Image (cartoon, rainbow, N blue to C red):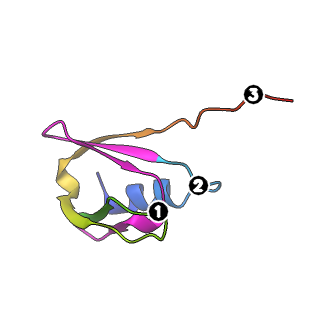
Amino acid sequence: MRAEELKELLNRQPSQSIRLHLTDGQTYDIKHPHNIMVSRSRVDIGVGANENGIVDRVDFISLLHIVRVEDLVTPVGPSN
């Protein structure tokens, strides 16, 4: 995946959560665009963010290993 393509997905309005699928089968759910930093060749993903936005660790992923991105659908609550 190209860096520009990923940035475009992350900058959509309204914001949409996404799931990144990697070549090894691992997935990352990106629920907020502030938890990921995109550079030319890799993404740095903050993992285990608490309610204050502080992460437990950062995983460094080569863009070459992202094979698929999907939107995470937010369940819609009952209407009144």
Q: In the rendered structure, are the residues bearing label 1 and label 2 in contact, judged by CB atoms less than 8 Å apart?
A: yes
Query: To which quarter of the image does residue 20 belong?
Result: top left
Considering depth in this image, is 60 or 7 the residue closer to the camera? 60
On the image, the x and y values in percent for residue 57 come to 24, 66
Circles 1 and 3: CB atoms closer than 8 Å: no
Badge 3 amino acid: Pro
The tag earlier along the polypeptide, 1 or 2, is: 2
Callout 2: helix, strand or loop? loop
Secondary structure state at the residue bearing disc 1:
helix
Classed neighbour count for the residue bearing mark 2: other residues with Cα under 10 Å, few (<14), some (14–19), many (≥20): few
Determine whether, in the image, residue 74 is placed left or right of residue 60.
right
Mark 3: secondary structure: loop
Q: Which residues are magenta?
A: 18-41
Residue 45 horizontal/vertical position (percent): 30, 62
For residue 33, the mark is 1
Q: Which residue is painted at 39% across and 56% down in the image?
A: 6
Identify the residue shown where x is 12% and y is 39%: 24
* Residue 10 falls within the magenta-colored stretch: no
Q: Quadrant of residue 80?
A: top right
Amino acid type assigned to the residue bearing label 2 in the image: Ser
Q: CA distance from mark 1 to mark 2?
A: 8 Å
According to the picture, the residue beneath numbered tag 3 turns out to be 78
The disc, 1 or 3, on the residue closer to the chain's N-terminal end is 1
Q: Residue furthest front?
A: 51
Q: Which disc, if any, is residue 3?
A: none
Q: Where is residue 11? Give x, y as percent.
A: 53, 61
Q: At x 28% / y 51%, what residue is drawn? A: 1
Distance, label 2 to label 3, CA atoms, is 22 Å
Residue bearing mark 2: 15
Residue at 63 percent across and 56 percent down: it is 13
